[in-house]
Image (cartoon, rainbow, N blue to C red):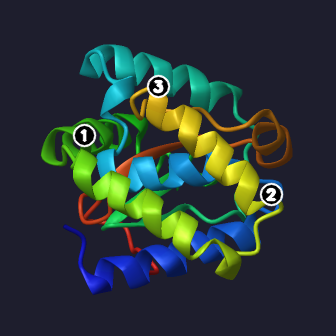
Amino acid sequence: MITTNEINELIEVVGRHAEKYPLAQPCDAVKLIYQSEFLGGHMIKSAEQSLLRLTEEFRQVEKSPGAELFEYIGNGVVRVNLAALDIEKYPLEALNRDFCESANLRRGSMEDFAAKLKVLVSKFSRFGFGFSAKELEDYLEKYREAGYPAVSHSEAYRLAYKPAYRVVIKKLPQKLHFPY
């Protein structure tokens, strides 16, 4: 069962993301909540494969040194933005270690995740998304029927924001300063 503090944090985080990413679609809002609950463990077959995938993605990402390195997504979790990553300060091996360790430390709860999706629906009017409550409800109906799988960002989100990140528990990269 999620607490009042968790609900308030969720409302704040989702509202901030709706404002920052106006082209987000229902799946992008769901992905945000999914990642804050379950992190990225669904992406990890082995630490070695994860590092190879991270290295290749980092090589291809357009660097943006002025971008935010960390984006808080709630529940003590951050997205580490590969476009802003300085591998001298946070080597890919360390990021991959933190990514894998985070996935192992946090399993998440389907009950809490479902409760958070209910908050997303009930507080929808507060967020200012560019999609309607009906679009969200229609998406969630199909999503529930599919068994709440991990989802990808929408094409609109990918094209506009070029997401490239790893999800970690914010306390793991101990030498780095989190602004949250």
Give amino acid for label 3: Ala
Tell me whether the residue at label 2 lies in contact with that at label 1, contact meaning CB atoms closer than 8 angstroms. no
Left or right: where does residue 140 sit relative to residue 35?
right
Q: Position of residue 155 (x, y in %)?
A: 79, 33
- Camera sees residue 86: no
- Above or below for 54 versus 122: above
- Above or below for 111 versus 154: below
Q: Position of residue 77 (x, y in %)?
A: 36, 61
| Residue at disc 2, secondary structure | loop
Alpha-carbon neighbours of circle 3 within 10 Å: few (<14), some, or many (≥20)? few
Left or right: where does residue 5 sit relative to residue 133?
left
Front in this rendered view, residue 31 or 67: 31
Label located before the other in sequence (3 or 1): 1
Q: Position of residue 11 (x, y in %)?
A: 51, 78
Q: Quadrant of the C terminus?
A: bottom left
Give the Cα distance between marks 2 and 1: 31 Å
According to the picture, the residue beneath numbered tag 3 turns out to be: 146
Q: Quadrant of the N terminus?
A: bottom left
**Disc 3 versus disc 1: nearer the observer:** 3
According to the picture, the residue beneath numbered tag 1 turns out to be: 103
Left or right: where does residue 9 sit relative to residue 17?
left
Give the Cα distance between marks 3 and 1: 23 Å
Mark carried by residue 164: none
Instruction: Tell me which residue sits at (56%, 44%) in the image.
Output: 140
Front in this rendered view, residue 167 or 85: 167
Instruction: Tell me which residue sits at (79%, 60%) in the image.
Output: 132
| Residue at disc 1, secondary structure | helix
Residue 107, picture quadrant: top left
Mark carried by residue 131: 2
Instruction: Tell me which residue sits at (36%, 53%) in the image.
Output: 114
Residue 138, picture quadrant: top right
